[in-house]
Amino acid sequence: MAIYVISLELSKNRNHDALWRQFLRWKCIALTKSVWLAELVGPATAIHDQLADHLSREDKLLIFEINYGSQWLVSSVDGRVKTWVAAKVGPQ
């Protein structure tokens, strides 16, 4: 399993409830309303394929992998996010 950042810009032309349910099943953690972190089995193309049915053509999606030991910094976010990232990616 790897850590993935999933960034979205969603259109208002579609109900995205199924997308949010998928994020709940995956136990994603929200960094912001449009940026989510998840520990998943990849690669990124497989994650995209699992999300594709929940997205419209107007929705924008970015998925990238972070490896343990990657440098990172978060500020002005919920303390759970910093704790989650430190546990999965390593100390700042």
Image (cartoon, grey):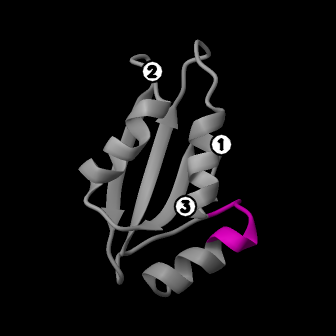
Residue, far top: 13
Query: Does residue 92 appear anywhere in the picture?
Result: no
Residue at 64% x, 56% y is 24
Give the class, few, some or many, for how many residues have Cα within 10 Å of label 2's Cα (few <14, many ≥20): some
Tell me how far mark 1 sits from mark 2, CA to CA: 18 Å
The quarter of the image holding the N terminus is bottom left
Q: Height in image: 68 above or below 55? A: below
Find disc 2 in the rendering and name its residue: 56
- Give amino acid for label 3: Trp
Residue flagged by tag 2: what amino acid is it? Ser
Q: Are marks 2 and 3 in contact (CB under 8 Å)?
A: no
Q: Which residues are magenta?
A: 75-81
Could you tell me which secondary element the residue under label 2 belongs to?
loop
Task: Determine whether the residue tagged by mark 3 lies in a helix, strand or loop.
Answer: helix
- Tag of residue 26: 3
Q: Circle 1 — which element? A: loop
Residue in the picture at 45% in, 21% down: 56
Q: Nearer the viewer, residue 52 or 36?
A: 52
Q: Nearer the viewer, residue 43 or 22?
A: 22
Label 1 vs 2, first from the N-terminus: 1
Q: Which of the 4 image quarters holds residue 61?
A: top left
Looking at the picture, tell me which residue is in the foreground, 68 or 22: 22
> Type of residue at label 1?
Lys
State the residue position of label 1: 33
First-in-chain label (3 vs 1): 3
